[in-house]
Structure formats: C-alpha cells, structure tokens
Amino acid sequence: MRRLAKQRGDNPVAVGLIGTGFVGSHLAHQFSLTPGLRTAVILNRTAANGVDAYRRSGHDIDDIVVSDDVKTIEGAIDSGTPVVTTSLEAFTALGNVEIVMEASGSAAHGAISTRACLEAGKDVVSMNAEADATVGWLLKSIAAENDVIYTISDGDQPGVLMRLIEYTEAAGFETVAAINCKGFMDRHATPESIKEWAVRFGISVPMITAFTDGTKINLENASLANATGLVPERRGMHGIRTTMATAVHDMVKTFDGHGVVDYTLGGDFGGGVIVLGYLDDPVSVAPVMQYLKMGDGPYYQFFRPYHLVHVESPVSIAEVVLDRDETISPRGPFVADVVSIAKRDLEAGESLDGIGGFTTYGEIDKIENTRGLLPVGISDHAVMKRPVASDRPISLDDVELDEESTLVQMWREQQALTPK
C-alpha cells in the first residue's frame, strides 16, 4: 500500500464501484481514506443510494452528478467530481475507469455486471462470493479470454483464508484444514424471523438471513475450495463446536484426512479464521514451535482473529494495479458446489426465493456428490414440480428453472466449459 501511495498518491486509481449496500457504501468511504485510490464512479440500480454513499463519504450532495451519459460521466471523473450512474452499458463504456470493485451482494446482478466489465476489458475485484460460487469458473475464463484479471477480494473470509494458507504453506506447513469461524447458525431462519437484526445492523434482510441460515458460510467456503482444491468432508461440513484452547485437538479428532474446508460454531473466535497446519519435524521444528507457544505439534493452529471486509479490499486493488496479481479465484472446474436444501416442506407449484429467503438454505459438498442437484445460486424463481420435505436436497428434476434468468444461462454456459 505504501508503493501504491508513492506511485499514485497524486493521481489516485480511478475505481468504479458497483453496489452501495452495507459493504459497497463502506467501500466508497474506505477508498476516500486510502492514499492512491478514489471512488471515481458508482454504478447502482437505485441512483439515490449511490448518491447517499458519496454523501456519507464526505461529499456535498449538491456536487454529486447523476447521469447515464458516457461523456458526462467521463467528464465528471476527469474533473474529480463524484458521479453516479444506473446504466451498466454506460459504466462498461467508460474509458477512464481503471479497475472495478463489484460489491452488489447479489449473485445474479454481480455475475452479470462482472461479466460485462470483463468483456469490456476491465479488471474486476469482487466481494461477491455468491456469484463466484455459482459461475466463478466462467468469469475466470472470460477474464482470461480478455486478458484481464478477475479476483475475489481480500477482507472477506475466502481472501483472508487464502492469504493465511499461502503464509503457512510458504513456511513448510501442509494445510490440513481452512476454517471459517461462525458464532451462531439457524438453518431455518427466514427474512421474517431475522428482520429485527437486519434493521439493527443496517444489512439487507436477505443478506443477514443468508448469514444466519449458513448459506453464506457455505458459499464462502465453496469459493475457497474452488480456488485451492480443499474440499468439505461431508455435505454442509462438520461445524465443529470448540474453543481456542481445544481447537487443535477437536479438529484433529474430527477430520478424517487433510485438505479440508470447514467451520467452527460458537466458541471464542470472534470474526477470525484458522488454518490448521501440519509439519512433523520433532528435531528442528517442534521445539521451536513449543517455545513460541504454538503447541506440541505436529498439528498447529494459525489463527487470525479478524477479517475486516472493506478495510482490506484496497490491498487486492493495489496488487492488481501494481503487479497484475490475483488474491483468489477459481483455478479450474469446480471441486465443490453449494446445493439447495428445503428450509421447510415444499409443495408442487411453489416458487423458490433464492439465497436468503424463506424456502431454501445452501450446503456445500464435493462436486461429485452434487450432480443432479440444484445449486442454490440459481434457485431464485425456480418452480417446484413435486414436493420436497424439509431439510432434504432439491434436485434439478424437482424444479423448473427460470430459463429467462441470465444467471441460469451463465450457469449452463459454465457447465459446457471444458478444462484448457
């Protein structure tokens, strides 16, 4: 970041920001605090929300331009004037946006806008695990075809865990497990039951429902799995109830092997992440690790007590701009997917309401165990053809997909991809 500030402090990188929900609005402010970056333009479906994000970042509301005209937007960017657009077509045509930050939080909107930006020759840093876990390999392939970069951002759990994995493996440790830490889960939470918490934290109701019912953590770990080759040992993962003091023992006892994604449930981990590493060297390594208060080995817990979401995203942007380097992205065909599970008894004729809704939650599984099952990312507006009982997986044969959905079409396109 010092290098970015030194090289671009007087001419900040012009970032195009997509989305101004909880994360997006904080990103707009964070870029104003980060030397070498600026929020050059905001794309948002509701212009007023984009204007409000700029206002909360310290801009006078009377100075903010709202336009869908390319020349007007480019002129505002060149003059350093904050500008908001609702037009994806205009946004992708802008010649003076250097990099795009996608933070819509919507699998469909995120996938569509990311694709459009990549095909327009723009690098994209994404905070959208929902889109990545659904069509991330397709997006990565489109990026490669257009000689641009697609990467998930630092700051959220997939990016933070990827950093920690790289750190521990560089030190010679084998990755036994990458662990997302979760305080609470209710798989049957609904937008109605969780609404109070959404209002309290200022987060959208579908998003906080997906946090609570576990869909989000499964999507995040699927993004990590597809970037690393780590996989869940069972559908939905173990969800280990443990504490800092006993985590190593409890994890080793739980896992059958190495190379796992999973999560802790409860405990004293806060918003942290864990990599469980293995290095069996009783002569040179174990005594030093004991001295450093890391335990007796050969299993070691590398714990990072936080993930800071938008605060850390500028690092990923800087790496792309300065070094053409990714933080984390799918490395090829998916090794894991997140399938739809009925949140309650579902009847024929019912329309599913997707991630963070009343009808389904998502659980990760190895890709070979998900054949023929409905990915949660494309479940929105699918219509049930037959009943499915609560807590049972929903198959593709159980539903009529919304074939008009661009995301469904992108998913089918991804299914037809072959490794290169």
Image: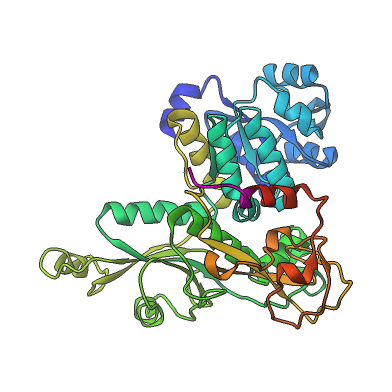
- Farthest residue toward the right? 349
Of 371 and 226, which appears nearest the observer? 371
Give the residue at x 69% y 46%. Answer: 110
Give the residue at x 54% y 31%. Answer: 148
187 above or below 27? below
Q: Position of residue 33 (x, y in %)?
A: 58, 36
102 above or below 12? below
Report if residue 401 is visible in the image: yes
Of 144 and 358, which appears nearest the observer? 144
> Which quarter of the figure is the N terminus placed in?
top left
| Residue 229: in magenta span | no
Give the residue at x 30% y 62%. Answer: 174
How has the structure been colored for display?
A: rainbow
Horizontal side of 107 relative to 292 (left or right) equals right
Please, what is the dominant secondary structure of the magenta stretch?
Answer: loop
Horizontal side of 306 relative to 202 (left or right) equals left
The boundaries of the magenta stretch are 414-420
Of 169 and 339, which appears nearest the observer? 339
Q: Position of residue 373 (x, y in %)?
A: 66, 68
Give the residue at x 53% y 35%. Answer: 144
Q: Position of residue 319 (x, y in %)?
A: 46, 35
Q: Quadrant of residue 350?
A: bottom right
Horizontal side of 100 relative to 51 (left or right) equals left
Report if residue 57 is visible in the image: no
Q: Position of residue 245 (x, y in %)?
A: 37, 78
Q: Number of labelled discs?
A: 0
